[in-house]
Image: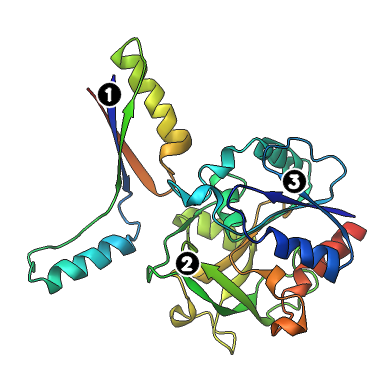
Amino acid sequence: MKAKVYVTLKKGVLDPQGRAVMGALKSMDFGEVKDVRIGKFMELEIDAASKDEETARIKEMCERLLANTVIENYRIEVE
Amino acid sequence: MKFGIIVFPGSNCDHDCYHAVKHVFNKEARYIWHKETSLEGLDCLILPGGFSYGDYLRTGAIARFSPVMSAVAGFAKKGGLVLGICNGFQILTEAGLLPGVLMRNKGLKFICKRAWLKVGNNSTVFSSAYEAGAVVNIPIAHADGNYFADADTMKRLEDENRIIFRYCDKEGNTTPDANPNGSCGNVAAIVNASGNVMGTMPHPERACEDILGRADGRAVFESILRGLAG
């Protein structure tokens, strides 16, 4: 099975990279951009018996390694 | 009195730490490869600076699962002294041995310079050789030193007097302008609740000899030696 994991910074956590990219976009005349937040996207290929089992296992992976829940949120999409 | 310096793949300040302990302070030291699991006979562990596992995913995120880290956690739980410097600090936060997280510097750049620091709590085993409120100058070298913790954690660190160094200007003012990387509360070094684990972004091991410019980092090691001597 395939799964996608999106790791994003929590609301209220300053994102200096997003801020810099937004500055660049504005200087390129994309003045309509109000905010940019940069996150991570991961694709996983997994041996799993069921979608539920897979989701539960990936959740554990996120909690323990893929995300740092002090500053990051994660979202899992299982195909 | 024996020091263990933990070497992860990508550590690059391990030799500096070894040099400081062995040649400046004349104490026993040995390297501990991250696959080792016995920390027998050691009194103080140092997690050195560097780029363990290439900083992949997040700084320290993968190193914290190295085999040696369970032993480090056990060592810390029993009251053993653990000093994490730079990448070592990042690994200790990822391992949950210290609160918070070190994020990308606010200015996005790798900063390599001498930083002015104000000594906070000087009654810990890592800081007793400093005078309270002293202003010292120790090198920093990092891209991810922007300390972040939520408001509750910051309050706890303040209330429990667990901040050891804060970035300041030459006069000792801990202003936003004197904050090189955007750290919450200008935090540069903290200890855990029981005071036996310290994480510091500044590199005391690079400031132990006058020939290196200044020796303001010596007092970290002198404090540890004093603490171990009881």
* Rendering coords of residue B76 (x, y %): 73, 44
The residue where tag 3 is placed is B32
| Image-quadrant location for residue B214 | bottom right
How far across and how far down the image is residue B167, in percent?
55, 75
Pointer 2 local density, CA inside 10 Å: few below 14, some 14–19, many at least 20:
many
- Residue at (57% x, 79% y) in the render: B115
- In the rendered structure, find residue B183 and report the number of the disc placed on it: 2
What chain does mark 2 sit on?
B
Instruction: Name the residue beneath numbered marker 1.
Output: A2
Mark 1, secondary structure of its residue: strand
State the residue at coordinates (58%, 52%). Answer: B10
Q: Residue at x 59, y 85 (%)?
A: B172
The reply to whether callout 2 and callout 1 are in contact (CB within 8 Å) is: no
* CA distance for labels 1 and 3: 39 Å
Pinpoint residue B25: horizontal percent, then vertical percent: 86, 68
Q: Is disc 3 placed on a helix, strand or loop?
A: strand
Quadrant occupied by the N terminus of chain B: bottom right
Amino acid carrying mark 1 in the image: Lys
> What residue is rendered at 57% in x and 44% in y?
B63
Q: Which kind of residue does numbered mark 3 sit on?
A: Ile
The circle drawn on residue B147 is: none
